[in-house]
Image (spheres, rainbow, N blue to C red):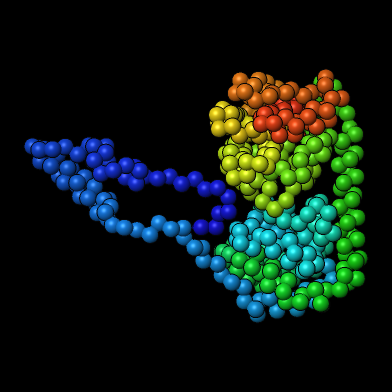
Amino acid sequence: MCSYRPVFVELPVEVLYPFDIVKNQMGIKENCKRFWDRIINFYLRWALCRLFQDAELEFDCSPLTPHLTETRIADVELVKQMLARSSRPLMLLGSQLMANFENIHQLKGAIELIGIPCYCSGMSRGVLSDDSELLFRHKRREALKQADFILLVGAVCDFRLNYGKSLNPMADVVVVNRGKNQIKMNAGWFWKLSHGICADPSDFLIKLSLANVNDSLKESRFSGWMKILRDQENLQELEIIKLTEQNSIDQNLLNSILLLKKVDSAAPDDAIFVFDGGDFVGSASYIIRPRGCLKWLDPGPFGTLGIGAGFAIAAKLCHPNLPVWIIYGDGAVGYSLLEFDTFARHKLPVVAVVGNDARWSQIHRTQTSIFGTAVGCVLEYSSYEKVAAAFHFKGIKIDGTNEKTVEGILNEVPQLNAHGIGVLLNCYISPSDFRDGSISL
């Protein structure tokens, strides 16, 4: 199994209940007289006995030790040689990097020691600190087209990389992945695989960093390349700042980009972020900074809406002393809004920020441009804060009428949360064109 997020496990009734209850539920009758009833009974009894034939045996129920394929030294040496020939290397880190918990504390040092520019995706966000010279967040597509060596570590060439078409066709591409079938995904059609390594991604990076790879990568060799990437990064940051200065179409609504900037400033430095939504969450991924390793939980590559409350419950139970902030879209919050009752009953004071633009924006954008209709995409500016208040949370509505006090409200939230008070901020936002061009699959 190659899933590195929570997995739904369904247990059959014969696992949950004892023999007599399962027998009763199967409808097995005693002393049947009709021929076909006896045949059916015979089959049901056979099936029941087969299910429970090993019920009295003792089994080893200790946790399974995952089998991790270790990195071969030959693969490390090959990548080291390829890096030595490169003048524009780039590394893309994926969620699989975080699967081996024993290596996580070594990862940051290993990546810094390797010393090539990095983009993080999924749960790998936060593995590098925000002030790292190697970390880049914007203009990834442009960087991938410019790079002459691309190292995909726990990342795959699926729709997120346009099935490989986002990669420079002239670049050497090395993929490190636990799954053999993941390494060659879409290779030969839209991109060229130079070398595939079936190994644990974190183990590979640590061994690469120990191979004295930095001896062959003098910082001056990449100074020009790093400057190109940093200039592109700064250009995008300027574009974001310009968007924060735009007035909303409706004065009663907030500028969503400016709101996210303020949320990023107000959230504590040790906060765990949980993201549940489409367009609003997509915008947040460009603006909100991960607070550290394993402090970023999102809906995953397929945008599985409704995970917000469940992830937040788990995060708060595992780390009761850390603040947990959920960034919701107004479409997604509807999936788990009643879990605020669970938060309250179990004394799990989380902070929820709802970007409420009264629409399924990610669907709305594509549907209206292709079909010319918004049917099924329009919601209401609903009072989600009142629902939260009914479950003993502090519900606050923020819109254009109290926009000047947004910073004050946001700065008060961590103090309330530190005193055990859960908060939901229902933020009425104006539709944004920040993610124009993105599609919903």
Nearer to the camera, 127 or 161: 127
Left or right: 274, with 140 as reference point = left
Q: Residue at image x 34%, y 46%?
A: 15
Q: How many marks?
A: 0
Outermost residue, left side: 33
Left or right: 30, with 26 as reference point = left
Quadrant into which the C terminus falls: top right
Outermost residue, front side: 419
Nearer to the camera, 401 or 314: 314
Q: Residue at image x 68%, y 24%?
A: 394
Nearer to the camera, 402 or 335: 402
Q: Residue at image x 68%, y 48%?
A: 295
Q: Looking at the picture, how far across and down is residue 288, in whole percent? A: 77, 43
> Is any atom of residue 355 visible in this view?
no
Q: Quadrant of residue 409?
A: top right
Q: Looking at the picture, how far across and down is residue 195, in whole percent? A: 66, 73
Q: Quadrant of residue 358?
A: top right
337 in relation to 16, above or below: above
> Is any atom of residue 271 visible in this view?
yes
Q: Quadrant of residue 17?
A: top left
Q: Looking at the picture, how far across and down is residue 140, in whole percent? A: 79, 55
Q: Looking at the picture, how far across and down is residue 393, in whole percent? A: 65, 25
176 in relation to 42, above or below: below
Q: Residue at image x 64%, y 68%?
A: 203
338 in relation to 186, above or below: above
Left or right: 397, with 202 as reference point = right
